[in-house]
Image: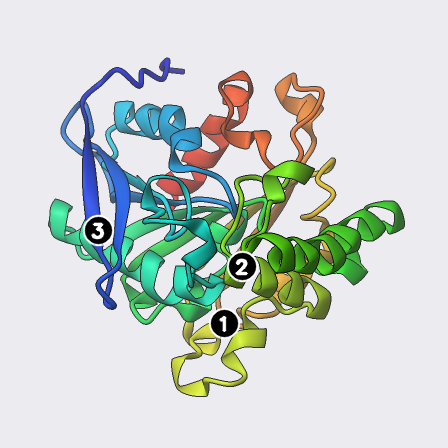
Amino acid sequence: MMNADVSQNFLYVEIKCSDGELLAGHFFSSKAPATGLPVLICPATGVKQHFYFRFAAWLAAHGRDVLVFDYRGIGLSLRGDLRTCKATLVDWGQKDQVAALDWLLARTGHEKVVLLGHSAGGQMMGLMSNHEKIAGVVGVAVSTGWFSGMRLAFRIKAMWGLLFFVPLGIKLLGYEPTAMIGLGEDLPAGVARQWGEWCAAGGYATNATQSMPDTDYHQNVRLPYVVFYAEDDDIANAVTVDDLMSTFPHAVKQVHRINPNQFGLKKLGHISWFRRSHEAVWPLLYSAIETI
């Protein structure tokens, strides 16, 4: 396995969305001539793009062009005060992921990309008008986060966080201080509200598309969809993953439940897949990319 080296050449880029919003991203060009389709890394909720840099560099070392970015209201894509940011989860899927995908195609000259989505990043293809430009999806720790599908102790914790703490934080601060309770970066109010609503209802983004059927692509997504989730993940489990899979009835799905011990790891959970300390699982993800 090659060592990831984030000191290699990579380029800061700005991605213009359909509504004029500018997103910040980084493009990692393959060290050798590209050997396959480019990879679009779509982050999890409240996770900055920098968290994925080492993995992106590792992919580039394996001959892939890679783009990773921050959604509006997150990291380098936050413009101005978070309290005035109007971003929603729907915006992330309908506008941000759409624009990032088109940017990567224009940059590389390819007709399709592989979308590698971490948690929320691999769950919103049903909102993407250009989903046909995705050759396939590798979803890591993807699920609906449906409260009713979680074990009781974690369900109580999640419901307290998203249904009590979130509204209170928004009322007091104008944004959601999720960093305070260990749920990633602070979030725009609209993102946090939808996150809680979708987790309470199950079905993830289908809750939003009920009111806008003309922009609902869940039934049209027919691409290969390879999913990995860890046995020790409290959010993505057999029930919540299956709930997400049901929202894409025509996708060609493969679901893999991963035991961290098989890779010499004590824990894997929801976030750690992309940490340097967990590089042992990266070839597993790359093998899925290669099949697309």
In the foreground, 23 or 244? 23
- What amino acid is found at the position of numbered circle 2 in the picture? Ala
User: Where 76 sits versus 86, above or below?
Assistant: above
**In front: label 3 or label 2:** 2
The residue at 14%/45% (across/down) is: 108
Task: Name the residue that disc number 2 marks.
Answer: 189
Task: Name the residue that disc number 1 marks.
Answer: 250
The residue at 80%/47% (across/down) is: 157
Chain-order first, disc 3 or disc 2:
3
Q: Is residue 182 visible?
A: no
In the foreground, 52 or 229? 52
Q: Are marks 2 and 1 in contact (CB under 8 Å)?
A: no
What percent of the width, then of the height, locates residue 58? 34, 24
Q: Is residue 60 visible?
A: yes
Mark 3–mark 1 distance (CA, rounded to whole Å): 30 Å
Chain-order first, disc 3 or disc 1:
3
- What amino acid is found at the position of numbered circle 3 in the picture? Ile
Horizontal arrangement in the rendering, residue 38 relative to residue 250 (left or right): left
- Identify the secondary structure beneath mark 1: loop
What percent of the width, then of the height, locates residue 267? 69, 25
- What amino acid is found at the position of numbered circle 1 in the picture? His
- Identify the secondary structure beneath mark 2: helix
Mark 3–mark 2 distance (CA, rounded to whole Å): 23 Å
The residue at 59%/75% (across/down) is: 207
Mark 2–mark 1 distance (CA, rounded to whole Å): 33 Å
Task: Name the residue that disc number 3 marks.
Answer: 15
User: Where 98 sits versus 282, above or below?
Assistant: below
